[in-house]
Image: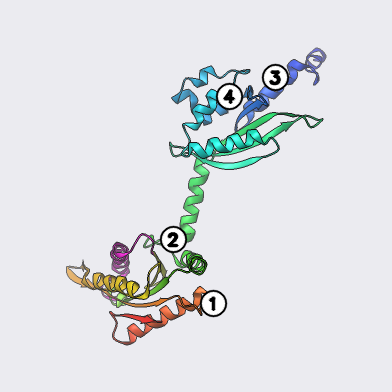
Amino acid sequence: MENEILKNKPEDPEFQHTLIKAILEASLDGVLVVNKQGIIVCYNQRFIEVWELSIHHPMAQNIAIGTSDEPILTTVTSRVSNPQAFLERVKMLYDNPELSDLCELELKDGRTLERHSRGLWSDNHQYMGRVWFFRDITTQKKIENELVKLIRRDPLTDIPNRRYFLERSVQEFVRARRHLTYLCVASLDIDHLKEINVHYGHAAGDEMLQSLCRQIQQQLRDTDFFARIGGEEFAILMPDVELEGAMLLCERIRQAIAQHKLFFNGQETGCTVSIGVTILKATDTAIEDCLFRADKAMYQAKKNGRNLVESAE
């Protein structure tokens, strides 16, 4: 036992080399270390796996300590979705040893890697090279995206919910003020949906809501933002359009909804929609001012007999 301990003295170069290699191979990250001349000092198997070099490229068998990292750089650059930005960032980091970097890389195969890099410095502050860490976070990103979807989208209709609408409305308000552009808002309320729930059940009411949302989406521009505020209430943000144009768009929506029918228990049925439209005014201090007027116009449409589009300036 004593002889084994003596063989593994910390200052023993062979022991240090073996220990460093073991640490590298134990890492969850793919690791690549290059010196200040861009020569490979060491790497681990996880680096090969993260970049799938053994699957897609014979480079995995040709990586060698003491050779240039240029062939590897060329290979991995071909895998990222934005090669130019990737290369520019790598060059900047090599040209600026004092910089550290943490970013996400989107790959062409759909995966996402997290990349971390920093310069390596000796005890007397001499630059020695750079270490690169790569971690596959594809599963993590998918979970994050699903969570964002749950937070921001209405589960029944799969369109943005009230929370997301309010976030987006503030952004559009700021954008319209900064660039001096138009912004219109519409408030929509489905007429007589409760009657469908009463006569045919809530499942029928849900199906009608989903179908009406699809009808509305077909009328919208790519830049419009449509959301469910709650229950039978919806809202639309319409950037870069004057009030007249917004009114025409909402009239198309009204007509599409009025003409749309579904069958429940063999009976044809449908709904109508009451819509209030307004435009951002110079005197509005917040987007809430605009939303309030749109709601007021919508209630006026209800009061005037429903299935109408009313405006509030």
Residue 285: which disc? 1
Quadrant of image for the C terminus: bottom left
Residue located beneath label 4 in the image: 69
Residue located beneath label 3 in the image: 18
Q: Nearer the viewer, mark 2 or mark 1?
A: 1
1 or 4: tag closer to the N-terminus = 4
4 or 2: tag closer to the N-terminus = 4
Q: Farthest residue toward the front?
A: 180
Q: Nearer the viewer, residue 137 or 304?
A: 304
Q: CA distance from mark 1 to mark 3?
A: 67 Å
Q: Main secondary structure of the magenta part?
A: helix
Tags 3 and 4 in contact by the CB under 8 Å rule? no
Q: Nearer the viewer, mark 3 or mark 4?
A: 4
Residue 276: which disc? none
Q: Position of residue 151 (x, y in %)?
A: 49, 60
The image shows residue 9, relative to residue 244, as above or below, that is above
User: The magenta stretch spans which residues?
Assistant: 198-224
